[in-house]
Each structure stands twice: as structure tokens, then as C-alpha cells.
Image: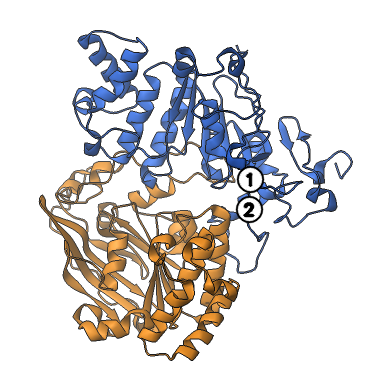
Chain colours: A orange, B blue
């Protein structure tokens, strides 16, 4: 069980560019680092995350609350506010580094190329503005004339499955599901290449959730945008995404095609997450979840951050952070269990 | 020694018909899971059982006694000891200016379960160990903000256990917790059921967790109980179109998302302020028939231990 043979330090960084065969990723996040400055010291919320999203792909980002999922989303759009600080890394969008854009460039870039759908539609919408005005606002900001914008607003509402008459409604007059659809309509207003969805359905009932997910899938087929889908619900991700990245305590611990991750999860944390969702079919068996709770990121555990909770912990895990190993070209895992045999 | 809860209830505050004709039985040592969307009346139902809100009409039998008769105005100390609540939000249900020991000592003192500083402290530590919070003596001195969500929910469970309850009403106890620790809390609930014979009413909107922990499952829609029965029977042979809709909406990794509409019923939950006659699901149901819009169907037993309220199964219909 013990692993005395590997005492030397981590091997090199993972191959930095992901499969160039497909003509280059749409968004390429490289070694992104974000800290929150607190009185207790910097909280390393995102610590060296690399993730590439190809055009038209749906990439799922899964992890618990506090693992840094939303921080990544906010960092990509550069909408983080002061105690948060981006300390390193690049986010290349069609080759341009978002982290280097100035304010004018950012203003143009946001929403026309990449937009975001937040978790709580009620908070994302302005309660004292009609939905129509909020939709027009986005489009006029980006230089569309009022007539064009108005036409487009009607079209967008059709697209997301709300009666265009509801454009005159205020947010509180819509049901939760409709509000989230309206937010999606706003996100699609300028026909972006990529949509970041930060737990878009967590606050909704299952039936409405299913409806909206289906709507998103249909829209994506029609319009061809990519999605970065953030959620803690792994079973949902397996259903909708092409690839999944698992995040724990600010780091990506495993990346794989959705189906492969579901059928062959490698990292003990991924396994633990899989073991945290009861199923509605099949044999009923005891699920264990994961003992313990996520670490304090001011002083993350030395070595592998998951080692205090890991059922397969070895001596090396508490000393050396595991390097990322590529099991296959598109399946990587950061765990000493897999460093050993290679 | 069975405990009966034929709760026939008609809650009519401000004409919002939040819960109508809800009846179910909780046997000793059994978990009954109430499943439904938000606004379906789940929480109202258990708040009535806990006697936090008055019941408009109906009866609650607890250990054979009709408690709304025997203690009409206010629940007795004894009833309040035997029936305990666990709330959804462990961040709101603990008082942030008091230590964990204070939270656990209060019920012990009020219900005279322990006296004297030493004895109380020992009981508190026992309780914390029961809910697997260790080292107990150290946790007891902490304040709620020093604990994680899962730990706080365990404290809430320990507080309910302090008075040796017979029935615990758990209102979405895991929905606010991190996914990786949810199963731990559910397993704890299950363990206490096995070891102490505690009964539960477990509220959730998540059918999968209802199946995991529930011996019986009751599905609520717009204030009505539309289907109920043994967990497995209900899951495998869901009869009510609403239950089928719920089941089809649960994310299922085994099947990828289809872009066609599938079983998807559209429309909204009817207003509960002036509910239309007939079945509340009629407005969304794909199999709606004429009688559905006129009469609320009665209970039909589809198989032993599994009933449904749907005209499709009414004796004069198909079944």
C-alpha cells in the first residue's frame, strides 16, 4: 500500500495546449489563479486551473460550494470585485487574452462574445424595470438601434418560449422558471459564442429545471454557442455536457468526457461525488458520501488538498501535490494513485 | 404500539388552500417522505403536525389519541417533547450568540432531562457523539459560525434528539448542505431510526433522496396528496401522471438529454387562492379526461400498499 518509490517532486506541467486537431479552443484558460484577500490571509479560491472549451462544446464544471467554480466564471468575465484579485494565468478567447483587455475592449467583449446566466434570476433582474427595457438596454449598449432591438426582443422571447406579450411584465410578475428564461433571453441578446451558466437551475423545481435544460439544449443546437455549465449536481452534468471538469478546493482534480467520467471515474473525490447522489432506479444500496468537510483555503492541506478526506490516502499524499496525469488524450487526473504505475 | 396519523386537514388561512385532505400514517420506526414542488404544501403539513400553525379542519392522532381534541389550544409539553422539528437551514436555526452547549442544554433543562452542570455537560457530550461530532467537549464550546453546514445540521439533529423524541419532522434537512456531506446526514437519520426506533416525516423535493431514505413516499401536488405507497412500489410503478412527470424530470445520467419534449407537461400550478374544482393537475395533465375538471378523484388502491388519486384508476375507469 505504501509508496516509498516516489519521493521526488511532481513531474512537469501537463501538456499545455489541448488537442489542436479541432482547430484551437474557443476559450483556453491557462493556469488561472484568483485569491480573496481577507484579514486572515489570502484565500486561494482558484489555484492554477487550466481548462479549454472547444467551439460548440458543453463543458460541465462540478464541485461543492466554495470550491471556486463561480470564481472562475467571474474571473473569465473579469467581473470580480476587490477583495478578489486575479493573481495569474491567462484566459484566451479566440486567441485574445481576456486578462489583458482594457475597459473599452472588455465592454465590447462582454455579452457580444461571452455572456453569463446567474443562479438567481430574481437577483439578476432589476425589479423596477420592465423585462423589455432590460433586454433593450443590453442591445442598445452595444449599438443596436431601438427598432432593431425591439424586433429582436420579440424574437428572443419566442426563442426561449415565453409569450412576447410578457416583455411588458416586471420581474415579480413572472414565475421563477419564466424569469430564468428571460435571463437566458438577455444572455442570448447579442448572439454570443459562449454562455457561462452558473447554477442556472439550482433554485428551480425539478420539472421546471428539466424544461429549461431542454430549452437550452435546443437553443444550443440551433445557435451553436458553447456552454460552460457550472453546478454541483453531477448527475445533471453527465446528462447535458460533453466534457466534465471536477473541481475541489480551487483545483481541477479530474477532466474527462462526460460519459467516460460517469463510467470510469478515477479520482477518489469524483468517486465520492458519484457516491453522493442517490438514484431513482436500479438497486438501492448504501451511499457513503464523503466524510469530513471541504478544507479552509487560507491554509489548504499540504500535498493533495483532498488527502484529509480521501479513503485511499497514502503517505506521499500529505507531502507532495500530485501532478496531472493524462490517462488518455482527453482524460486527466491529479492523484498519486495514478502517478505510481506510470 | 403503532402511531397513527390519519390527518384529514383543510387549511384555509386567507383562503389559500395550502393543504387539502392530506391523510397519512406514520408507523413507529418508519420514514415517510413527503415529495413535491415548492408550494405544494409539504412544509405546511408538518408545521400543522408540529402544531406551529392551527389546523383548519381535520384530525391528528398521535399514539392513538386525537391530540387536537385532547389538547385543543396548545400542544402539551409531552407532545412537544415527542415531536421534534429539524429545519432546512442550519445557518438560521441556530442562534449565533450562543455556544453549541447552550443550544443542547436548553431542551434538556426545559424538559427536565438532566439537571446540574456536570450531568448536563455529560448529556451534551453524549448527544454530540451520537451525531458523530467529535471531539465532543471541544465542539460543545464552539459557536455556530465555527462549524460547517453539515456540522450545524448535526447539531440541529442532536438538539431534536436531546428530548428522546418519538417522531422527528425533517424539513429538507439536506438541501442546503454541500453535496459531499449530504449522504452522511441522511445515513445518520437512518441510523437513528434503526437504533432508536424514531419515526420521521422527511420532506424533500428530490425523489432520489426520498427513495433512498423513505419507507413510504407521499407525493403532494398543489396541496393534495396525489399518490402514496411503499417507496419501491411507487418508484417502479408510478401511477399518477404527476409522479411520472416528476420522475422523468430527475436528472438521469443513464440517459442523455433528449431535445424532444418527452413526457413534459406544460403549464403552471393552479392558483391555490380559488382552486378550480376537480383534480389540481388537470390543467397540466397530458391524459386529462372530462371528469378530471369536475371532480377530485378519490383514493384508488393500485396494489397493496400503493394508492393513487387519479380518474385513470377510478373503479369506473380503466382499473
Residue B277 place in picture, x, y as percent: 76, 46
The image quadrant that residue B124 belongs to is top left
Q: Report the front residue among A186 and A2.
A: A186
Chain assignment, label 1: B
- Quickly name the residue at label 1: B222
Left or right of B286 in this view: B248:
left
Residue B311 is tagged as none
The reply to the same-chain question for discs 1 and 2 is yes
Left or right of B251 in this view: A299:
left
User: Could you tell me how far apart the alpha carbons at marks 1 and 2 are, in whole angstroms?
Assistant: 7 Å
Residue ranking furthest to the right = B316
Do callouts 1 and 2 mark residues in contact (Cβ within 8 Å)?
Answer: yes
Label 2 SS:
loop
The image quadrant that residue A329 belongs to is bottom left
Residue B298 place in picture, x, y as percent: 78, 37
Q: Report the front residue among B149 and B191.
A: B149
Q: Report crowding for label 2: few under 14, some 14 to 19, many 20 or more residues within 10 A (C-alpha).
A: some
Left or right of A342 in this view: A219:
right
Residue A332 place in picture, x, y as percent: 33, 64
Residue A268 lies, with reference to residue B33, above or below; the image says below
Q: Residue at x 29, y 67 (%)?
A: A74
Label 1 SS:
loop
Query: Looking at the image, how many numbered discs can be counted on the residues?
Result: 2
Q: Report crowding for label 1: few under 14, some 14 to 19, many 20 or more residues within 10 A (C-alpha).
A: many
Residue B269 is tagged as 2
Amino acid at each position: 500500500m505504501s509508496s516509498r518509490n516516489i519521493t521526488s517532486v511532481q513531474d512537469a506541467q501537463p501538456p499545455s495546449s489541448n488537442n489542436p486537431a479541432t482547430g484551437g479552443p474557443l476559450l483556453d484558460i491557462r493556469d488561472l489563479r484568483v485569491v480573496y484577500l481577507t484579514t486572515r490571509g489570502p484565500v486561494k479560491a482558484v489555484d492554477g486551473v487550466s481548462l479549454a472549451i472547444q467551439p460548440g462544446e458543453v463543458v460541465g464544471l462540478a464541485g461543492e460550494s466554495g470550491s471556486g467554480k463561480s470564481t472562475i466564471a467571474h474571473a473569465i468575465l473579469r467581473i470580480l470585485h476587490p477583495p478578489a484579485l486575479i493573481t495569474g494565468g491567462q484566459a484566451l478567447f479566440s486567441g485574445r487574452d481576456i486578462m489583458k483587455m482594457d475597459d473599452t475592449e472588455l465592454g465590447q467583449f462582454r455579452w457580444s462574445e461571452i455572456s453569463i446566466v446567474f443562479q438567481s434570476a430574481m437577483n439578476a433582474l432589476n425589479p423596477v424595470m420592465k423585462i423589455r427595457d432590460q433586454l433593450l438596454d443590453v442591445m442598445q449598449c452595444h449599438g443596436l438601434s431601438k427598432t432593431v432591438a425591439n424586433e429582436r426582443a420579440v424574437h428572443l422571447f419566442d426563442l426561449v418560449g415565453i409569450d412576447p406579450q410578457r416583455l411588458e411584465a416586471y420581474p415579480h410578475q413572472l414565475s421563477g422558471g419564466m424569469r430564468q428564461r428571460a435571463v437566458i433571453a438577455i444572455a442570448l441578446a447579442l448572439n454570443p459564442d459562449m454562455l457561462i451558466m452558473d447554477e442556472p437551475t439550482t433554485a428551480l423545481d425539478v420539472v421546471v429545471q428539466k424544461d429549461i435544460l431542454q430549452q437550452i439544449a435546443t437553443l444550443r443546437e440551433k445557435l451553436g454557442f458553447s456552454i460552460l455549465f457550472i453546478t454541483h449536481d453531477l448527475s445533471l452534468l453527465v446528462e447535458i455536457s460533453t466534457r466534465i471538469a471536477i473541481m475541489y478546493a480551487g483545483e481541477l482534480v479530474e477532466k474527462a468526457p462526460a460519459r467516460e467520467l460517469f463510467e470510469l471515474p478515477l479520482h477518489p473525490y469524483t468517486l465520492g461525488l458519484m457516491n453522493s447522489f442517490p438514484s431513482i432506479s436500479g438497486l438501492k444500496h448504501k451511499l457513503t458520501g464523503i466524510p469530513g468537510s471541504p478544507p479552509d483555503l487560507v491554509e489548504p492541506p499540504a500535498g493533495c488538498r483532498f488527502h484529509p478526506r480521501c479513503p485511499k490516502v497514502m503517505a506521499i499524499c500529505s507531502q507532495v501535490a500530485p501532478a496531472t496525469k493524462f490517462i488518455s488524450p482527453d482524460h486527466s487526473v491529479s492523484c498519486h494513485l495514478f502517478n505510481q504505475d506510470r | 404500539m403503532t402511531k397513527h396519523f390519519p390527518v384529514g386537514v383543510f387549511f384555509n388561512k386567507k383562503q389559500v388552500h395550502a393543504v387539502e385532505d392530506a391523510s397519512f400514517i406514520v408507523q413507529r420506526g418508519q420514514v415517510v417522505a413527503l415529495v413535491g414542488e415548492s408550494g405544494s404544501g409539504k412544509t405546511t403539513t408538518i408545521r400543522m403536525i408540529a402544531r406551529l400553525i392551527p389546523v383548519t379542519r381535520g384530525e391528528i392522532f398521535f399514539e392513538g389519541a386525537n391530540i387536537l381534541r385532547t389538547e385543543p389550544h396548545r400542544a402539551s409539553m409531552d407532545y412537544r417533547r415527542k415531536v421534534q422539528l429539524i429545519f432546512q437551514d442550519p445557518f438560521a436555526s441556530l442562534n449565533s450568540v450562543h455556544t453549541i452547549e447552550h443550544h443542547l442544554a436548553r431542551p434538556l433543562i426545559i424538559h427536565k432531562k438532566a439537571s446540574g452542570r456536570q450531568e448536563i455537560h455529560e448529556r451534551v457530550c453524549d448527544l454530540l457523539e451520537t451525531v458523530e461530532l467529535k471531539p465532543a467537549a471541544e465542539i460543545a464550546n464552539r459557536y455556530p459560525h465555527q462549524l460547517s453546514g453539515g456540522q450545524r445540521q448535526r447539531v440541529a439533529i442532536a438538539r431534536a434528539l436531546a428530548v428522546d423524541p418519538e417522531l422527528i419532522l425533517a424539513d429538507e434537512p439536506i438541501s442546503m448542505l454541500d453535496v459531499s456531506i449530504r449522504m452522511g446526514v441522511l445515513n445518520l437519520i437512518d441510523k437513528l431510526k434503526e437504533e432508536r426506533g424514531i419515526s420521521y416525516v422527511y420532506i424533500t423535493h428530490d425523489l432520489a433522496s426520498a427513495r433512498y431514505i423513505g419507507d413510504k413516499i407521499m407525493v403532494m401536488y398543489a396541496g393534495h396528496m396525489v399518490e402514496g405507497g411503499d417507496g419501491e412500489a411507487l418508484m417502479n410503478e408510478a401511477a399518477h401522471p404527476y409522479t411520472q412527470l416528476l420522475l422523468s424530470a430527475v436528472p438521469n445520467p443513464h440517459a442523455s438529454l433528449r431535445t424532444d419534449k418527452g413526457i413534459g407537461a406544460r403549464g403552471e400550478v393552479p392558483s391555490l387562492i380559488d382552486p378550480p374544482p376537480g383534480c389540481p393537475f388537470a390543467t397540466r395533465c397530458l391524459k386529462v379526461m372530462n371528469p378530471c375538471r369536475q371532480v377530485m378523484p378519490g383514493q384508488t388502491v393500485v396494489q397493496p400498499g400503493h394508492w393513487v388519486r387519479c380518474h385513470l384508476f377510478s373503479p369506473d375507469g380503466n382499473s
